């Protein structure tokens, strides 16, 4: 009687009796999903250790541990606590933000290609940043603000241009591609008009980089993410219903356009957060949800595994960008390759079917 | 659809379609004249003819027409036809109304090789860029086709597109790593990426012309077979079409056309997407008419965009690649906003 229905996947069922602590909690977690999340967490931990120990100034693990517990000399503490730790944490948080945002958009458009890159946010952010850097010769904060305004304006424009008695996924993607093509033409032109030095630093910014980011950037990001991630999770059930189609979702008590708008706001806010902190980082939002879905074997796109996968990808990408080649690159250059590998992986899967 | 194909086979093209083709040929001739005459130094039409027939090296107007605008116009005709027809072929063989040569990695391949030439060999001249871009476009297109058609079930449209996106993103990752570390390569790339017909001399035109003409001839020859491919692979086989041979020839033609066009003019978007749609909209679904119409409509679009670019800015010119993006994007949006996207 109490045995859960077998859906071909084994579940862990957690039940807390009504009078126990936490009162009447009951949840089911797929074992496969749990195992996948755990292994992603372990990999994240591994890469954190690797990024703490490796670099120009190699530090053995025991010294890292000493610095973390507040011992060791000042140089050691500065390198570990002020430079490497915040950067690794930031990579995880921003990767998670990108992963959730991608999951939301792919689920909304019901299309594995429906990432914020595709709906033109990244290109719009680049345009905004270029205008701020080249036309108004702004510094860091002006650039970030410009990127946010550019990205938001583009996302809203794409959404409005797609709107025709609702927003259809395929149309959203095509309109996004069209607007992105237009904006990237404008970007190329602006880069051509600028001084070489300015243009190069703009290109560096546009690749997306975690270089030199410390606690002062980590704290606001952590704060914003602690608001946005729970709201995304709270909306995950209506999101699942929406995947069944508008009619089915309406029948189960979801108001499709209302929920879609809320989800789009959360999704855009998450990607805006990542863009403002590190510049437009390509492809994490595209690849993370699909890789997570396959490894966690969830039925649809799930937010939690996507967030972990996003964090893992960005952390690993940032580590590779710093240490794999012998010279330091912006992480965005690496994520392009992550995107390429993701597509090749899609291709081989497609071939096996 | 079948009725249309069968009817088309009897060569009974309605008068309206022939009239449209004639009218657009006339429009193309007018645009060629306009492209020779218009610019910051306007030249009257009689002087244009004089410059072409009896060239006077001492006259500034003659120099403008003969040395600058003639190669530019010829390049517009050739590259326009090349981009347009390669787009038409990709759309027909992948049965994807929104396909474009850029999606198969042509632009990325050309850009990557130009970056390599500038970054590692220090080559930045237009001539060197031309050959490297051509080489890159060909190598990468062949690579994409090879990846896309590997595996048991051969090349399906979706595999081809995925292979294109994969190769594009890996190449642009490596390419941007090179340009970010090397200011010389960066400077050379930011010029090349604009996509322009200006500043190319007659040598460039003569270099790419044989490749483009060969590609156009192949396209014209396989266009009847494209009609049966439009019905789906099974139907095409039932009608006696050799699908693999047609796809292979189409791939060769696309490689020649898009490679040579991109090598000569840089990455110019949307022509390959728009022109076949205009042809389909005006001339109907017969692929022979679409290919023929695209050869006329695509140069019209490109030359018109180029001429507009000469006047849009107060000082200097706006590169044609930017004009086509700003013209093409709204059209693409209108296309998808219509009740259903125009099918094949």
Image: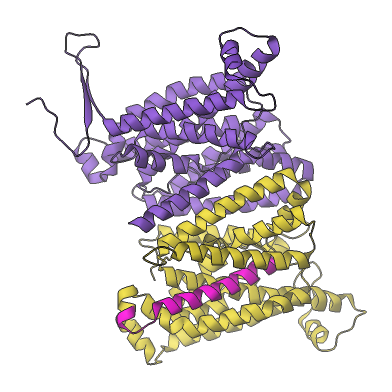
Chain colours: A purple, B yellow
Q: Image point 42% across, 68% down: which residue? A: B94
What quarter of the picture does the N terminus of chain A occupy? top left
Residue B114 vs B223, above or below: the answer is above
Q: Image point 61% across, 7% down: which residue? A: A71
Per the image, is A276 magenta?
no
Q: Image point 65% across, 76% down: which residue? A: B77
Q: Quadrant of residue B140?
A: bottom right
Q: Is residue B55 left or right of residue B22?
A: right
- Residue B304, percent from left and from top: 64, 70
Q: Nearer the viewer, residue A351 or B249?
A: A351
Residue B337 vs B15, above or below: the answer is above
Per the image, is B260 magenta?
yes
Q: Is residue B2 left or right of residue A336?
A: left
The answer to whether residue A289 shows anywhere in this view is yes
Looking at the image, how many numbered discs can be counted on the residues?
0
Q: Image point 59% across, 16% down: which residue? A: A64
| Region in magenta | B237-265
């Amino acid at each position: 009687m109490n045995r859960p229905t077998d859906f071909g996947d084994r579940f862990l069922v957690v039940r807390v009796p009504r009078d126990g602590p936490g009162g009447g909690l009951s949840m089911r977690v797929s074992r496969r999903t749990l195992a996948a999340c755990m292994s992603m967490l372990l990999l994240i931990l591994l890469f954190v250790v690797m990024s703490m120990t490796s670099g120009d100034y190699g530090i053995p693990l025991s010294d890292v541990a000493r610095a973390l517990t507040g011992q060791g000399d000042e140089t050691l503490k500065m390198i570990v606590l002020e430079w490497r730790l915040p950067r690794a944490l930031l990579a995880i948080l921003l990767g998670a933000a990108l992963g959730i945002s991608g999951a939301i958009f792919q689920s909304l458009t019901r299309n594995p290609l429906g990432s914020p890159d595709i709906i033109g946010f990244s290109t719009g952010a680049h345009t905004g940043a270029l205008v701020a850097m080249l036309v108004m010769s702004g510094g860091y904060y002006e650039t970030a603000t410009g990127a946010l305004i550019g990205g938001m304006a583009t996302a809203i424009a794409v959404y409005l241009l797609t709107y025709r008695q609702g927003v259809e996924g395929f149309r959203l993607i095509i309109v996004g591609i069209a607007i992105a093509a237009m904006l990237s033409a404008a970007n190329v032109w602006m880069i051509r008009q600028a001084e070489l030095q300015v243009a190069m630093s703009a290109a560096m910014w546009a690749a997306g980089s975690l270089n030199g980011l410390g606690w002062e950037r980590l704290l606001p990001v952590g704060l914003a993410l602690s608001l946005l991630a729970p709201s995304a999770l709270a909306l995950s059930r209506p999101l699942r219903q929406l995947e069944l189609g508008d009619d089915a979702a309406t029948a189960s008590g979801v108001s499709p356009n209302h929920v879609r708008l809320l989800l789009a706001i959360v999704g855009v806010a998450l990607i805006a957060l990542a863009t403002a902190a590190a510049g437009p980082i390509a492809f994490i939002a595209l690849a993370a949800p699909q890789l997570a879905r396959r490894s966690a074997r969830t039925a649809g796109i799930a937010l939690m595994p996507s967030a972990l996968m996003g964090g893992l990808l960005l952390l690993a990408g940032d580590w590779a960008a710093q240490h794999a080649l012998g010279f330091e690159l912006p992480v965005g250059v690496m994520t392009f390759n992550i995107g390429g590998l993701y597509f090749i992986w899609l291709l081989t899967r497609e071939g096996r079917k | 659809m079948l009725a249309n194909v069968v009817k088309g086979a009897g060569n009974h093209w309605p008068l309206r379609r022939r009239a449209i083709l004639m009218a657009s040929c006339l429009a193309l001739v007018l645009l060629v004249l306009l492209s020779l005459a218009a610019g910051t130094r306007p030249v009257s039409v009689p002087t244009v003819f004089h410059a072409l027939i009896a060239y006077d090296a001492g006259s500034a107007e003659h120099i403008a027409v003969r040395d600058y605008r003639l190669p530019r116009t010829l390049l517009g005709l050739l590259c326009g036809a090349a981009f347009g027809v390669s787009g038409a072929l990709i759309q027909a063989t992948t049965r994807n109304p929104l396909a474009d040569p850029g999606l198969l990695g042509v632009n990325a391949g050309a850009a990557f090789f130009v970056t390599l030439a500038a970054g590692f060999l220090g080559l930045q001249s237009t001539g060197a860029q031309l050959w490297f871009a051509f080489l890159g476009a060909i190598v990468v297109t062949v690579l994409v086709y090879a990846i896309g058609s590997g595996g048991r079930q051969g090349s399906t449209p979706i595999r081809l597109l995925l292979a294109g996106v994969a190769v594009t993103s890996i190449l642009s990752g490596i390419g941007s790593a090179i340009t970010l570390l090397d200011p010389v390569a960066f400077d050379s790339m930011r010029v090349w990426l604009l996509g322009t017909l200006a500043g190319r001399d007659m040598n460039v035109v003569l270099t790419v012309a044989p490749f483009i003409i060969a590609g156009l001839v192949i396209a014209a020859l396989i266009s009847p077979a494209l009609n049966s491919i439009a019905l789906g692979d099974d139907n095409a086989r039932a009608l006696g079409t050799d699908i693999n041979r047609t796809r292979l020839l189409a791939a060769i033609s696309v490689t020649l056309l898009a490679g040579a066009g991109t090598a000569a003019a840089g990455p110019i978007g949307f022509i390959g997407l728009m022109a076949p749609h205009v042809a389909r909209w005006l001339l109907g679904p017969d692929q022979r008419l679409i290919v023929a119409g695209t050869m006329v409509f695509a140069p019209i679009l490109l030359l018109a965009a180029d001429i507009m670019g000469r006047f849009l800015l107060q000082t200097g010119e706006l590169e044609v690649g930017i004009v086509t993006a700003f013209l093409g994007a709204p059209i693409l949006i209108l296309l998808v906003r219509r009740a259903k996207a125009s099918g094949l």
